[in-house]
Amino acid sequence: QVQLVESGGGLVQPGGSLRLSCATSGSILRINDMGWYRQTPGKQRELVAIITRAGITNYADSVQGRFTISRDNAKNTVYLQMNSLKPEDTAVYYCNADIFAAIEGRGRYWGQGTQVTVFS
């Protein structure tokens, strides 16, 4: 069974940094793009950053220059380095990946989310 598990969320003051990780497990054959999304109460989930298997990245305008997405293909893990955090970055952050799995076939999978709270 394919699973994605996020970690690294927490409380931080404005201007601070956090690093999120998303580890995968299961009968994974290949992972294409991996991404981070976030959601606040009453709002739709929005894309924060995405990275292709080749390492091509794309960011939401609101985080460009502050956040960096990276991945380790050997470990099937994706990271999100978040610097210069602002109160408006407060949200639940979700990992997402396009995965080919031996048993389940191809599909997009989500993690359970990790809370990031930026407050002074």
Image (spheres, helix red, strand yellow):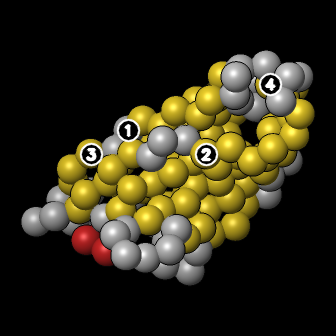
Where the N terminus falls, by quadrant? Answer: top right
Decide: is 63 above or below 69. Answer: below
Q: Secondary structure at mark 4?
A: strand
Task: Using the rendered view, name the quadrant where residue 116 is placed.
Answer: bottom left
Residue 49 visible? The answer is yes
Q: Earlier in the sequence, mark 1 or mark 2?
A: 1
Residue visible at 79% across and 57% down in the picture: 56
Q: Is residue 11 above or below residue 43?
A: above
Q: Secondary structure at mark 3?
A: strand
Circles 1, 3 touching at the beta carbon (< 8 Å): yes
Question: Image quarter for residue 22?
Answer: top right
Packing grade of label 2 (10 A; few <14, some 14-19, many >=20) is: some
| Quadrant where the C terminus is found in the figure | bottom left
The residue that label 2 is drawn on is: 110
Q: Which mark is residue 19?
A: none
Decide which of tag 3 and tag 2 comes sooner along the chain.
3
Is 57 on the left-hand or right-hand side of 64?
A: right
Q: Secondary structure at mark 1?
A: loop
Give the Cα separation between the discs numbered 1 and 3. Answer: 7 Å
**Residue flagged by tag 4: what amino acid is it?**
Ile
The residue that mark 4 highlights is 28
The span from disc 4 to disc 3 (Cα, nearest Å) is 29 Å
Q: Is residue 33 left or right of residue 96?
A: right
